[in-house]
Amino acid sequence: MKVTLRQRKKGSKTSLYLDYYHKGTRKTEYLSLYLDETNPTKEQKELNKKTLQLAESIRAQRQIEIQNGVFGFRDNEKLKASFIAYFEILANKRFDSQGNYGN
């Protein structure tokens, strides 16, 4: 599983986006962050550097989210599990819990 920070030229600016690739599935997420390379002043270079650092931190956060199963990619092992067995386990937990008052 991989999350890659990529750049694409759009006119005079460069757009930053994330490219997700997981088990044959590819998704892209545009970050609405842009690098401006038309006027290479010291301030502009510093701003571009900070923008790249922000984009890299977002990329690292998305990588962690995907590894923890938060982002929306499905785990094939979980899809193969039996729903009835899962539901019976939940029903037994609820039946054995304190304070269910006959529910």
Image: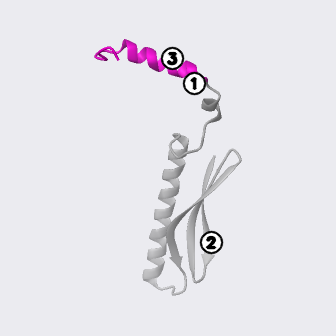
Q: Magenta span has 100?
A: yes
* Sequence-first disc among 1 and 2: 2
* Image-quadrant location for residue 81: top right
Task: Give the mark toward the camera: 2 or 3.
Answer: 3
Stretch in magenta: 82-103
Residue 8 numbered tag = 2
Q: Amino acid at mark 3?
A: Glu
Question: Which residue was labeled with disc 1?
Answer: 83
Say few, some or many: other residues with alpha carbon within 10 Å of mark 2 (under 14 / 14 to 19 / 20 or more): few
Residue farthest top in this picture? 96
Task: Give me the C-alpha separation between circle 3 and circle 1.
Answer: 9 Å
Kindly indicate whether the residue at mark 3 contacts the one at mark 2 (C-beta within 8 angstroms).
no
Q: Residue at x 54, y 49 (%)?
A: 63
* Colour scheme shown: one colour
Considering the numbered disc 1 on the image, is that residue within a helix, a strand or a loop? helix
Image quarter in which the C terminus is found: top left
Task: Give the mark toward the camera: 1 or 2.
Answer: 1
Q: Amino acid at mark 2?
A: Arg
Q: Residue at x 44, y 69 (%)?
A: 50
Question: Which residue was labeled with disc 3?
Answer: 88
